[in-house]
């Protein structure tokens, strides 16, 4: 492979990625780069040969890395990119800050980002995927993001640049988000923390939080997330169409569609990435055959079989 620039941070060749994903599957990346700081990230990307692919990875909570691994430099931000700051009515969070931590720190300051509390992942991923739950999305309170382009330039991305949609955004290829700014509504700190406790209890009662999963497997065909309210309708929920197709609990190798929540794909212990993705594709086919609905993956799948 082409010679790479020598950074101040950590650059590891042939780094197995399975232990960096929540599903614990996948082969090696050509390289894993953990930048020392912003300047290190910028100069590395600027000097990286143009033919080398870049993939920015968060905490791997919404990701299947295929068994053949990834022909790319995987960039994983860590310390130095995980700060959370409250300035007036704004919350500025590093891309590596965990969504749950951001929600708690915002609540301490009487700012309502409670929807982030139960989302497994970090801020960079939340922006990229327009993460949301209970009818609220990242886009609702997003002001801007700082990012580094593939050419190493520091840029500001606006909501218009990102063109947020349900579980999607138009983040330019190879761009690495380093922080995001939000202006959430105000709330009373105690009430916000109480609401988050309720949300956690509800999540643990309805989702397989003790199993190895990557959160929701497929987007809701309805085109929006569950509101969590009593009048929520379930006809076009992914879990409902999967159950109706008889695929709740279905297995392939070590992969299973959870018996607790049909839209959660879990690794029961010894699944390969091929088992997980193959079962997901089987579910998509069965759902299409039974209802005419084409489920779209919410979990990102990358790399080579």
Image (cartoon, rainbow, N blue to C red):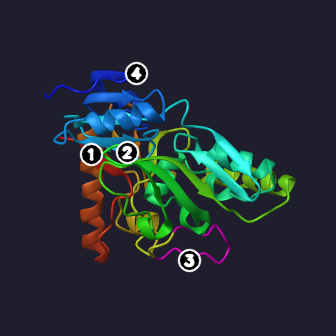
Q: CA distance from mark 1 to mark 2?
A: 8 Å
Q: Residue at x 62, y 65 (%)?
A: 141
Disc assigned to residue 8: 4
From mark 1 to mark 4, how far is it between C-alphas?
Answer: 27 Å
Residue 133 in view here: no
Sequence-first tag of 4 and 3: 4
Compare marks 4 and 2 and give the one earlier in the sequence: 4
Q: Are marks 1 and 2 in contact (CB under 8 Å)?
A: yes
Which part of the image, by quadrant, shows the C terminus? Answer: top left
- Mark 2 vs mark 3: in front: 2
Dot 1 alpha-carbon crowd within 10 angstroms: few under 14, some 14 to 19, many 20 or more: some
Which stretch appears magenta? 225-235
Is 141 located above or below residue 148 in the figure? Answer: below
Q: Which residue was labeled with disc 3?
A: 233
Label 1 and label 3: CA atoms lie apart by: 33 Å
Residue identified by numbered label 2 = 63
Q: Check residue 302 in the rendering and tell me which mark sits there, or answer none.
A: 1
Q: Helix or strand or loop: what does disc 1 sit on?
A: strand
């Amino acid at each position: 492979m082409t010679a790479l620039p020598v950074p101040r941070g950590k650059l590891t060749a042939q780094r197995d990625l399975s232990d960096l994903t929540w599903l614990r599957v996948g082969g090696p990346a050509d390289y894993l780069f953990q930048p020392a700081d912003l300047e290190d990230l910028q100069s590395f990307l600027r000097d990286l040969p143009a033919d080398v692919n870049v993939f920015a990875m968060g905490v791997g909570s919404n990701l299947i890395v295929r068994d053949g691994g990834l022909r790319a430099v995987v960039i994983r931000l860590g310390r130095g990119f995980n700060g959370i700051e409250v300035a007036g009515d704004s919350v500025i969070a590093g891309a590596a800050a965990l969504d749950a931590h951001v929600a708690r720190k915002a609540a301490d300051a009487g700012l309502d980002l409670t929807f982030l509390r139960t989302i497994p992942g970090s801020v960079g991923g939340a922006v990229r995927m327009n993460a949301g739950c209970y009818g609220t999305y990242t886009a609702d309170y997003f002001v801007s993001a700082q990012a580094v382009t593939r050419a190493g330039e520091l840029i500001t991305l606006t909501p218009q640049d990102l063109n947020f949609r349900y579980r999607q955004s138009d983040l330019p290829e190879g761009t690495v988000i380093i922080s995001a700014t939000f202006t959430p509504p105000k709330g009373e700190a105690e009430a916000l923390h109480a609401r988050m406790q309720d949300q956690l209890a509800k999540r643990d009662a309805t989702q397989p939080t003790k199993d190895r999963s990557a959160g929701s497997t497929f987007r809701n065909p309805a085109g929006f997330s569950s509101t969590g309210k009593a009048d929520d309708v379930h006809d076009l929920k992914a879990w409902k169409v999967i159950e109706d197709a008889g695929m709740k609990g279905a297995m392939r190798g070590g992969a299973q569609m959870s018996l607790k929540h049909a839209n959660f794909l879990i690794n029961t212990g010894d699944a390969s990435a091929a088992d997980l993705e193959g079962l997901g594709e089987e579910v998509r086919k069965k759902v299409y055959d039974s209802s005419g609905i084409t489920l779209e993956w919410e979990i990102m799948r990358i790399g080579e079989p």
